Image: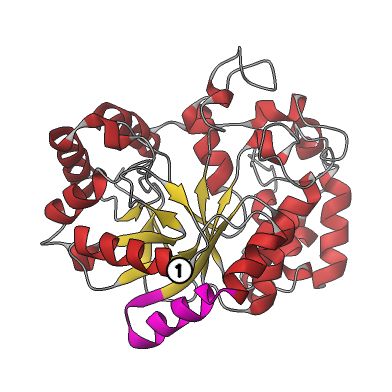
Amino acid sequence: MGMEYRKLPHGEESLSVIGMGTSSIGMAGEKEIAATVELALESGVNFFDMASADAAPFPVYGQVMAGVRDQVHFQVHFGANYQGGTYGWTTDLDTIKRSVDWQLQALKTDYIDFGFLHCLDEEADLRQVLDGGVLDYLQSLRRAGAVRHIALSSHTPRVANQVLDLGIIDLMMFSINPGYDYHHGDYAIGGAEERMALYRRCEAEGVGISVMKAFSGGQLLDARTSPFGQALTEYQCLQYALDKPGVLAVMPGVRNQADLRRLLGFLDAAPEERDYSILGTFTPADAAGACVYCNHCKPCPAGLDIGLINKYYDLARAGDQLARSHYQNLEKKAGDCIQCGHCDRRCPFHVVQTDRMREIQAYFGA
């Protein structure tokens, strides 16, 4: 299977579902960085996050991508500072201007696909970028064509919602993984329903999500550090994130070609390798009974796509005007449920889908 792509709702860009983060690749050396980027391009990866741990990847990316700049999309962070050679975080406007100018020069480009308000996790951080002129600067660059889309990176649902209220962003980078969604980890901010409500709001309002920290910094991949006492696989975590409403791409950090090849194997992985239904035995009480669209209930004897029906219902209630029409276009709707209970017995999250189908039928009238 080749690369899969998802379209940005507020734009024409189609983004590869597996993007590439730069957090760890700087240590690989110029030759390996270049070879890894070339492998990514050959494999159909067209989405690159530039929140690097150091300055090393930027000039290499610029060199390798000089001839294909119009085919790739960069996430550039207004707040990531590389003046000292390593990553630093800042909300100071003059420092941000110098850092962005350097990043553009190193990347050999005169425009930014996604200009990010970077890592706003506290309300005080948001006030600083608003009062300090950072957002005004970003918007001026967008008007001039130097920034195509304004975006936000955050780990905090409350702050993310405040930025969504401003109506200024087309993309949000957010930390999504089973640990954070179910109260485990340093960035497990907000309850399960609060986080899911954020994802649904993004889809309803046409704000795409690119996912960071899909493996919780590797903690989920090792039974010794997994908060669930059992390791998950990279493919389970990737599928988990891609199934969330609003998500366009997952941006795992890679260290070298070997890491990238292994992650790209996800595209050819069998459904059972991607299946994360084991999470149903780990989830806390406040997450039980909520459909997460994992489709572990398939196949439905009556042919319903139960996960998709649930997703359209949740999105319609969240205000997504298109969700109702998408639902009406389904060949099989909730009203076609034969109440056999097959899905109820299979659901690892303890959702009584037969009741849910009656509720959805009543809501949509079919």
Residue positioned 44% across, 48% down in the render: 88
On screen, residue 295 above or below 151: above
The part of the image, by quadrant, that contains residue 312 is bottom right
On screen, residue 196 above or below 170: above
Q: Is residue 341 visible?
A: yes
Where is residue 26 drawn, in percent x and y? 28, 37
The quadrant the N terminus occupies is: top left
On screen, residue 205 above or below 295: below
Q: Which residue is mark 1?
A: 8
On screen, residue 328 above or below 232: below
**Residue type at the position of mark 1:** Leu
The part of the image, by quadrant, that contains residue 32 is top left
Mark 1 falls on what kind of element? Answer: loop
Where is residue 23 drawn, in percent x and y? 39, 40
Where is residue 67 drawn, in percent x and y? 10, 62
Confirm whether the magenta stretch covers residue 286.
no
Residue positioned 40% across, 87% down in the render: 143
- What span is colored magenta in the figure? 132-148
